Image (tube, grey):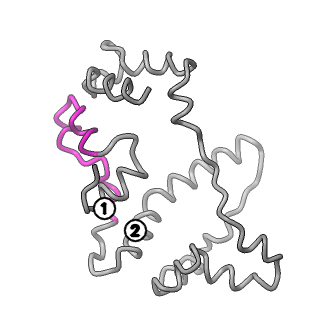
Amino acid sequence: FRTPDVDSLYLDNFYCGFPGSQLLDMARTPLLRHASPYRTFHSAWSVEPQQSTLSRLLFSDHKTYLIELLMKQDQMSMAASIESRVPFLDHTFVEFAMRLPDHLKLPSGGKHIFKKAVEDLLPRDIVYRPKMGFPTPLRKWLGEGRADFLHKYLCDSKGLVAEYLDVSKLTGILDRHR
């Protein structure tokens, strides 16, 4: 069930394994019951409320998700002894991109200006190919027998998670998922 707010439409869907309301319902400690799981995102989201929804989402992502993603990228590249670079995060380039009007950011499924800039340098089928992500088959993995140990660990009434979450509620959610 979705409500018309940024938590429900965006954050619950993208940032969390559970909707925020469900996570708060499972919380055992007062700190978790009264804290927003999206506190950091909301801080960035609230900086300039007069901006467009797209600008606020992009700014908030830069201040939260992108930092986390870059840390993971750095750790993975170092673990594989790869010296990686992120050229599109040059601060002057990012500042330029952030100042662009919304209508230039999203036409044709995103990266419109970049695609226009390189379409005479690269083959068209490369520039305009569909986005290719790196999906993790988490839903499938959690439904397989190999995940039994994880289910048992998370739902252990004497385990670490039990100190923070109501294990019976978590067990019900995980069982419904399976």
Q: Residue at x 67, y 44 (%)?
A: 76
* Residue 160 colored in magenta in the image: no
Task: Give SS at disc 1.
Answer: helix
Is 152 placed above or below 73 here? above
Amino acid beneath label 2: Leu
Residue 18 left/right relative to 63: left
* Residue 114 in the image, given as x and y percentages of width and height: 66, 80
Give the distance between the C-alpha atoms of the residues marked 1 and 2, in whole angstroms. Answer: 9 Å
> Which span of residues is magenta-colored?
20-44
Q: Mark 2 points at which residue?
A: 57
* Residue 31 colored in magenta in the image: yes
* Residue 50 in the image, given as x and y percentages of width and height: 27, 81
Q: What secondary structure do most residues of the magenta stretch adopt?
A: helix
Q: Which residue is drawn at 70% across and 48% down?
A: 77
Q: Nearer the viewer, residue 55 or 6?
A: 6
Q: Name the residue under label 1.
A: 6
Q: Are the residues at dot 1 and dot 2 in contact (C-beta closer than 8 Å)?
A: yes
Q: Nearer the viewer, mark 1 or mark 2?
A: 1
